[in-house]
Amino acid sequence: MDRTTRQVGCHVTIPFLMKRERAPNAVSVMVDGQQHDGHWILDGGLVRVTSAYGVKSTQLGGSPATLIAQRLLRELVQTGLEQTRPGR
């Protein structure tokens, strides 16, 4: 079995083609009045975002990948900013 097929049950294989983007796409969000940038890729059925605050991914659902990437970047930034605030 190669990377484009998946076994179903005991003897049947079906094509398993998931879109995979090679080049990262830019994504930006505004948080607390500041712009934060990152990059995202579509890897199989996952949207994966990378930024200065880390990496986060989730399954591609019914929403456009660009909107999912923005949401993930916003979550990364907000978590990162919370961890660097004084008194934490």
Image: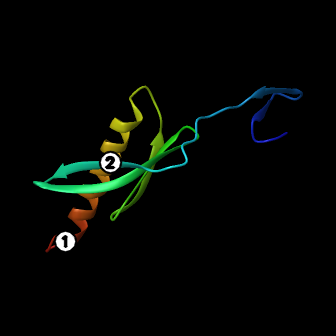
Instruction: Locate residue 52: give its quadrant.
Output: bottom left
Q: Position of residue 16 (x, y in %)?
A: 70, 31
Q: Residue at x 23, y 48 (%)?
A: 29
Tell me if residue 86 comes above or below residue 9 in the rendering: below
Query: Disc 2 or disc 1, which is closer to the eye?
Result: 2
Q: Position of residue 66 (x, y in %)?
A: 36, 38
Q: Which residue is mark 2?
A: 27
Instruction: Locate residue 33: give its quadrant.
Output: bottom left
Q: Residue at x 89, y 27 (%)?
A: 11
The extreme bottom residue here reads 86
Q: Residue at x 41, y 36 (%)?
A: 65
Instruction: Locate residue 81: give its quadrant.
Output: bottom left
Q: Looking at the image, how many numbered discs can be counted on the residues? A: 2
Give the side of residue 7 with respect to residue 79, left or right. right
- What's the amino acid at mark 2? Val
Q: Position of residue 42 (x, y in %)?
A: 50, 42
Q: Residues within 10 Å of mark 2 (few under 14, many from 20)?
A: many
The extreme left residue here reads 33
Callout 1 secondary element: loop
Query: From mark 2 to mark 1, how far is it between C-alphas?
Result: 28 Å
Give the side of residue 28 with respect to residue 40, left or right. left
Give the side of residue 80 with respect to residue 4, left or right. left
Q: Quadrant of the N terminus?
A: top right
The numbered disc on residue 9 is: none
Q: Position of residue 6 (x, y in %)?
A: 77, 34
The extreme right residue here reads 11
Q: Quadrant of the C terminus?
A: bottom left
Q: Which residue is mark 1?
A: 88
- Sequence order check: which comes first, mark 2 or mark 1? 2
- What's the amino acid at mark 1? Arg
Callout 2 secondary element: strand
- In the image, 61 versus 87, the foreground residue is 61
